[in-house]
Amino acid sequence: MSLKLKIIFILFLISLSLAFYLVSISERVFVANENENVIIEIDSFKEDEQSDITKIDEQLVDTVQTDESESLNLEQEKERGNDESLEINNELEMLDILFNVPFTPQAPYAEWNDPVHQDGCEEAASLMAVSWARGEKLNQAKAKNEIVAASDYQKENFGEYRDASAEDTVKRIIQGYFKYENAKVKLDININDIIFELANGNIIILPMDGQKLNNLYYTPPGPVRHMIVVIGYDEEKKEFITNDPGTKRGESYRYSEDVLYNAIRDYSTGYHELIKKQEKTMIVVKPE
């Protein structure tokens, strides 16, 4: 083969090798580009997936917050319901307390000039309270007989029937004459103590300075030593409801709580003994 042909053949091989080399590089570049595209697509997918996950998380957070909000609203509704229930209960507690206690004045037949009946408020108050506690009824004849008999019992056993203190009213009249034990004296009381006993189903006998009650039906100026029975309480009007034996109009007679409380004053046993101090005392009578 001539030299010229050899040179041409060598150049051809070089060109062919170069061609193959270029083709190989091109394929690698294409594959690289495709891989890059795949990586970019994968990254893009990951970003989209992360965005979706973030959205899902946000939705879950919103759902949880909504549930918490709804739960809070339910709790608030429950609290509101409890408050309304409390208000209803308070309204129920504010209803009148009133016991059906039989009434008699201390002078059932208007014998106000008779000394026994003039000073018969302790006996009459005790009679009303014990009759209620035992579920017994009263009429004029029975009331008169019991008041006189209770006075005679005290005179025979203690030498005096007039002006019995709260303590002696319990010992001598309620427990002594009527033989009823479920009564006791409480000292240093306030208005709430009276209401508390009424709310617990008991009635009250109070020793009073009758002149401070300003009862229009008393013979002026009213009794200095007196006893009444508290049979109820009106929360709305702030009034105590009483059976006051000092007048025939004393059944369910009302006194404002301040007037009644200011007039409470115990006194010593014995006819018109000197009252040295103002003691706030009450007799609590419980039903059988």
Image (cartoon, rainbow, N blue to C red):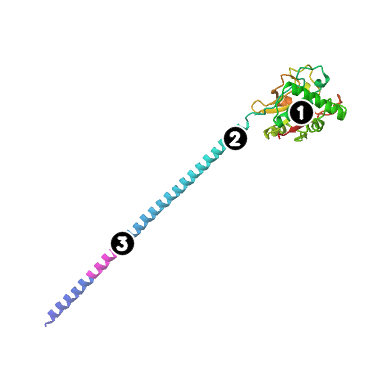
The segment highlighted magenta reads 23-37
| Residue bearing the label numbered 3 | 38
In the image, taking residue 61 as reference, residue 3 lies left or right, namely left
Q: Name, please, the residue furthest toward the left.
A: 1
User: Residue 162 placed where, x, y %?
Assistant: 84, 25
Say few, some or many: other residues with alpha carbon within 10 Å of mark 2 (under 14 / 14 to 19 / 20 or more): few
Residue in front for this viewpoint, 61 or 73: 73
| Residue bearing the label numbered 2 | 89
Residue at the image position 72 percent from the left and 29 percent from the top: 131
The tag on residue 4 is: none
Q: Secondary structure at mark 3?
A: helix
Answer whether residue 137 is magenta in the image.
no
Residue in front for this viewpoint, 183 or 180: 180
| Disc nearest the viewer among 1 and 3 | 1
| Residue bearing the label numbered 1 | 126
Looking at numbered disc 1 in the image, what kind of residue is underneath it? Ser
Residue at the image position 20 percent from the left and 74 percent from the top: 17
Question: Label 2 vs label 1: CA separation?
Answer: 34 Å
Q: Secondary structure at mark 2?
A: helix
Say few, some or many: other residues with alpha carbon within 10 Å of mark 3 (under 14 / 14 to 19 / 20 or more): few
In the image, taking residue 235 as reference, residue 61 lies left or right, namely left
Residue at the image position 14 percent from the left and 80 percent from the top: 6
- Earlier in the chain: of badge 1 and badge 3, it is 3
Q: Secondary structure at mark 1?
A: helix
| Disc nearest the viewer among 3 and 2 | 2
| Residue 205 visible (yes or no) | yes
Question: Label 3 vs label 2: CA separation?
Answer: 74 Å
User: Residue 148 placed where, x, y %?
Assistant: 80, 23
